[in-house]
Image (cartoon, helix red, strand yellow):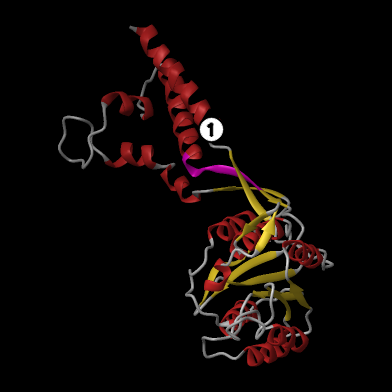
Amino acid sequence: MVAPSAFDFAWPLAFLLLPLPFLAMRFLSPSGEAGGALRVPETLVADFADGQAVLSSQKRRLVLSWLLWILLVLAIAGPRTVTAAPAAPASGRDIVLSLDVSGSMERPDFEVAGEKRRRMDVLKTLARTFVLGRAGDRIGLVIFGERAYVAAPLSFDVAAVAKIVDSLDVGLAGRSTAIGEGLGLALKKLSDSDARSKIVILLSDGAQNAGTVQPGSAAELARTLGIRVDTIAMGPIDLGQGQRGDEGVDVATLSGIAAEAGGTAYRVRTTEQLTEVMASIDALETSPSDAPATIVHASLWPYPGALALGISGLMMLGRRGRR
């Protein structure tokens, strides 16, 4: 537990260097003798020696030399202040976005400002805005297609997660749709969380046609783990309404997941509806909790370092004055 304001050293073992000049004078031979492992210049030996009869100027230089050495060692030890700065308030909620990036997200059937846009582009824009607005939440990102992957681990750094959302594109996880895999991986990321509220926001524009995890089984696991799952069925038509019969979003399955996991099922056919849904989820009430404090260090070594530099300058001027 760090006090609100404290003082310590980055490298306290540096103080073991303090007796080094004394040891050098005591055990190393003066220049010209071969008994020592290290040859010490005569000027340094004279500065630190306490011979029989030394002049007052030499005594002053000896004191200054020791003071210089102490200040250098102090600077090396890295004195610093330690402050526990309060972090941004945390909501106590962990949210994982589980997003469908399968091949069907390529379809340009959503309208923005009168122009047709790909489902993926519309989703990225709104998901990015949603993530950036979740300061205080821990946000994670899972993407799924034929397989499921963790695109971003749970983090308070919403800006970093938003950048990853910007980098998403169709087909990153395969062209098929494994809804159960996407939900299962999101649940796995939240299973070890101790957050007061754990939520998965699952968005898909298709139906399960890949993977080994059944959506219903994943929904039951979510209920067991106490994880809420909100689902967003994105697409203009429901499963079975297309010409081929296998097109459209599986609204029934996504609604069943939300019902089983205590969440809300949303049906989205237009850009406006998707915007409203993201805003509705964004308005969820928070559960305030204390965020861990951030430990801030402020280095103080320049102060003894500057004093040592000043003393060395005075010693050099004094030596020149005697010449």
Magenta range is 76-82
Dot 1 crowding, Cα within 10 Å, few <14, some 14–19, many 20+: few
Q: Considering only vertical position in the picture, is 195 above or below 315?
A: below
Q: Residue 80's spot in the image, x, y percent?
A: 59, 43
Q: What residue occupies the far right of the structure in this picture?
A: 285
What secondary structure is marked by label 1?
Answer: helix
The residue at the point 50 percent across, 49 percent down is: 12
Residue 109 visible here: yes
Q: Residue 87's spot in the image, x, y percent?
A: 72, 54
Q: Amino acid at mark 1?
A: Pro
In this orientation, which residue lies closer to the viewer: 48 or 192? 192
Q: Considering only vertical position in the picture, is 19 above or below 196?
A: above
The residue at the point 61 percent across, 79 percent down is: 206
In this orientation, which residue lies closer to the viewer: 179 or 54? 179
Locate the N terminus and report the quarter of the image it occupies.
Answer: bottom right
Locate the C terminus and report the quarter of the image it occupies.
Answer: top left
What residue is pinned by disc 1?
302
Residue 102 visible here: no
Q: What residue occupies the far front of the structure in this picture?
A: 243
Describe residue 172's horizontal placement relative to residue 51 as left or right: right
> Residue 58 lies in what quarter of the image?
top left
Q: Considering only vertical position in the picture, is 276 above or below 33?
A: below
The residue at the point 72 percent across, 73 percent down is: 195
Q: Considering only vertical position in the picture, is 52 above or below 225?
A: above
Q: Does the segment drawn in magenta span residue 203?
A: no
